[in-house]
Amino acid sequence: MMSTLVRPGETTKVSLRINNVVHQVEVEPRKLLVHTLRDIGLTGTKVGCDTSVCGACTVLMNGKPIKSCTVLTVQADGSDITTIEGLSVEGKLHPLQEAFWENHALQCGYCTSGMIMNAYALLKEHKNPSEEEIRNYMHGNLCRCTGYQNIVKAVREAAKRMGA
């Protein structure tokens, strides 16, 4: 079996549907999705730890939360990606974003986009999650500022607003 080596600087064309807009991008095969998103101007997705521990880079890929620091852009070719910027509509915050704001579920804000994206996926699966279900689902997202109580409170509030 013969392997194909990629030379530095070689690129591959990738098509991504991001927040309902199709993007054709040329990327090196080793480029991470988080960096591609930021390069096209979607800077709400944060680079935290680069090891998939913190969850700051969480986005939805084909409706499922993924840590975009662990996915190569070429692996996402043809995928539907939703970032934090894709939740608001015509400048109006999504109910989950409003709930985070109103319940003081953020402090420095660094983890917030990843937290919200993971919570959004949770609320799509479970319309009215318990506190324990929220804490379980959110275990892959770290926050060093809030202590999580207000994050849980915000997710429960958003569930009510979203019709749970």
Image (spheres, rainbow, N blue to C red):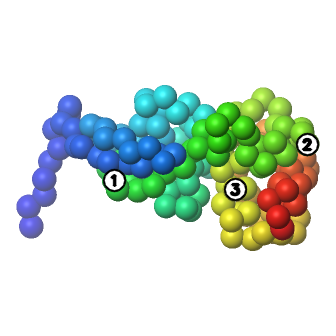
Q: Does residue 48 appear in this view?
A: no
The residue that disc 2 covers is 103
On the image, the x and y values in percent for residue 116 come to: 71, 48
Q: Nearer the viewer, residue 13 or 51?
A: 13
Residue type at mark 1?
A: Asp
Q: CA distance from mark 1 to mark 2?
A: 37 Å
Label 3 near label 2: C-beta < 8 Å? no
SS state under label 1: loop
Q: In the displayed orientation, state which residue is furthest to the left.
A: 2
Find residue 99 and name its label: none
Residue type at mark 3?
A: Tyr
Q: CA distance from mark 3 to mark 1?
A: 23 Å
Q: Nearer the viewer, residue 124 or 32?
A: 124
* Mark toward the start of the polypeptide (2 vs 3): 2
Examine the image and state in which quarter residue 63 appears: bottom right
Structural crowding at the residue carrying mark 3, measured as other residues with C-alpha within 10 Å and reported as few (<14), some (14–19) or many (≥20): many
SS state under label 3: helix
Find residue 77 and name its label: 1
Residue at 43%, 31% (x, y): give it: 40
On the image, the x and y values in percent for residue 49 come to: 59, 39
The residue that disc 3 covers is 120
Residue at 52%, 33% (x, y): give it: 42
